[in-house]
Image (cartoon, rainbow, N blue to C red):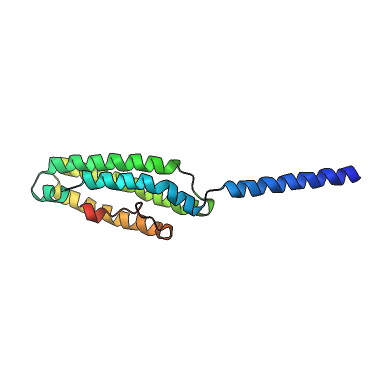
Amino acid sequence: MQVKRIVMSVTAALLLLGVVASIAAATTRDEYVEAVEPICRTNKEANKKILDGVRAEVKAGKLDLAAKKFARAARALKRTRLELTKVEKPAADAKKLTRWLDYVKTEAELFEAVSRKLAHGEKTAAQKMVVRLVSNARRANSQVLEFEFRYCEFPISQYI
């Protein structure tokens, strides 16, 4: 009887220790922000270089050049999203961050759509896609406001 109590106590203690260890090992919001900010910073700097002057090129009728820039921006954002999906999300924020990453995926798709429209000479249709792109970026940014990202916000309207 005494041995049974000791075994049960030790088992309960080990189980409790395992739960505490798993809680301690979980990613916090601050750790997540620290992990993703360098990834986003790289993308933000790349977009600044890639999309530099794209608005003027569209206005000047250089649609092929602008289309290539949008395609490059789409590829860069896809790579960034892939890296972001590899970072472990905090359990409490997993749903919100998954939704944010879905917006990022949509943003990359919209960059590609703008590129296709411009490549086919459809300037007005491309402008409509840009409006959708800006709207999607705003929704993505509002999804993660409480994270207080410095680089992981997508200020698309600055570039286009």
Residue at 10% across, 44% down: 62
Q: Is residue 98 visible?
A: no
In this view of the protein, can residue 103 be seen by the observer? Answer: yes
Quadrant hosting residue 64: top left
> Which residue is drawn at the image coordinates 18% and 52% (left, top)?
127
Left or right, 133 with reference to 146:
left
Q: Quadrant of the N terminus?
A: top right
- For the residue pair 109 and 8, the one nearer the viewer reads as 8
In this rendering, the count of numbered labels is 0
Residue at (38% x, 55% y) in the render:
149
Q: Nearer the viewer, residue 88 or 37?
A: 37
Q: Tell me residue 118's x, y (percent).
A: 16, 44
Q: Where residue 128 sits: x, y (%)? A: 21, 53
Percent from the top left, x then y, of residue 74?
28, 42
Q: Splitting the image into 4 quarters, where does residue 144 fall?
A: bottom left
- The residue sitting at the left extreme is 60
Residue 136 location (% of width, % of height)? 31, 54
Q: Residue at x 44, y 40 (%)?
A: 86
